[in-house]
């Protein structure tokens, strides 16, 4: 069982320098979890890749279809965003250092992973990695 932020989920479907290592990690994990915010973030990442011509529109359709199938089939388990997660996020933010940069999507990922009992989160986002200990977690990267 492993928790991926949206960036790592995208690496499972799009090709970039870390994609192969992330895919190997996903294959060994058995079960992949992520916050439901990944649904929007994944769609935006695929749209961006299409806009920047890194993939074709037809590849975009296939990638979105494959991701949706992975979610539907339970290969990727999506943690619903709840009031409880948002409340815990606010509690964690109240104790974080004022100079720690954290985006709302990353905070949702951290609070979701923590809520579900994960002790580590996998990402390549440097801000999320720095914030993970403040949520009682270890930030990991390939």
Image: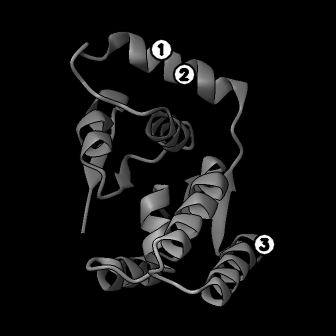
- Near mark 2 (Cα within 10 A), the count class, few <14, some 14-19 or many ≥20, is some
Numbered badge on residue 88: 2
Disc 3 packing (10 Å; few <14; some 14–19; many ≥20):
few
Query: What is the secondary structure assignment of the residue under circle 1?
Result: helix
- Image coordinates of residue 36 in percent, x first then y, are 66, 50
Q: Say whether residue 73 is visible.
A: yes
Name the side, left or right, on which 118 lies relative to 56: left
- Picture residue at 68% right of the left edge, 76% below the top: 64
Front-most of 86 and 37?
Answer: 37
Which of marks 2 and 3 precedes in the sequence? 3
Q: Are marks 1 and 2 in contact (CB under 8 Å)?
A: yes
Residue under label 3: 72
Which residue corresponds to the image point at 30% horizontal and 51% vertical from the top-left?
125
Give the secondary structure at mark 3: helix
Label 1–label 3 contact, CB within 8 A = no
* Distance between mark 1 and mark 2 Cα atoms: 5 Å
Q: Which residue is label 1 attached to? A: 91
Given residues 52 and 140, the one toward you in this image is 52
* Vertical arrangement, residue 120 with respect to residue 124, above or below: above
The picture places residue 8, in percent across and down from the top left corner, at 42, 65
Q: Is residue 18 above or below residue 131?
A: below
């Amino acid at each position: 069982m492993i928790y991926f932020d949206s960036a790592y989920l995208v690496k499972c479907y799009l090709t970039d320098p870390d994609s192969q290592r992330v895919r190997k990690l996903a294959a060994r994990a058995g079960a992949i979890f992520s916050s439901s915010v990944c649904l929007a973030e994944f769609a935006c990442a695929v749209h961006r890749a299409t806009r920047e011509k890194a993939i074709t529109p037809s590849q975009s359709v296939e990638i979105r279809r494959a991701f949706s199938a992975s979610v539907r089939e339970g290969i990727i388990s999506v943690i619903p965003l709840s009031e409880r997660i948002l409340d815990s996020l606010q509690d964690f933010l109240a104790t974080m250092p004022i100079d720690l940069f954290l985006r709302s999507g990353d905070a949702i990922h951290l609070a979701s992973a923590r809520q579900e009992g994960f002790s580590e989160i996998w990402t390549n986002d440097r801000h999320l990695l720095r914030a993970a200990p403040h949520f009682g977690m270890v930030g990991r990267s390939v």
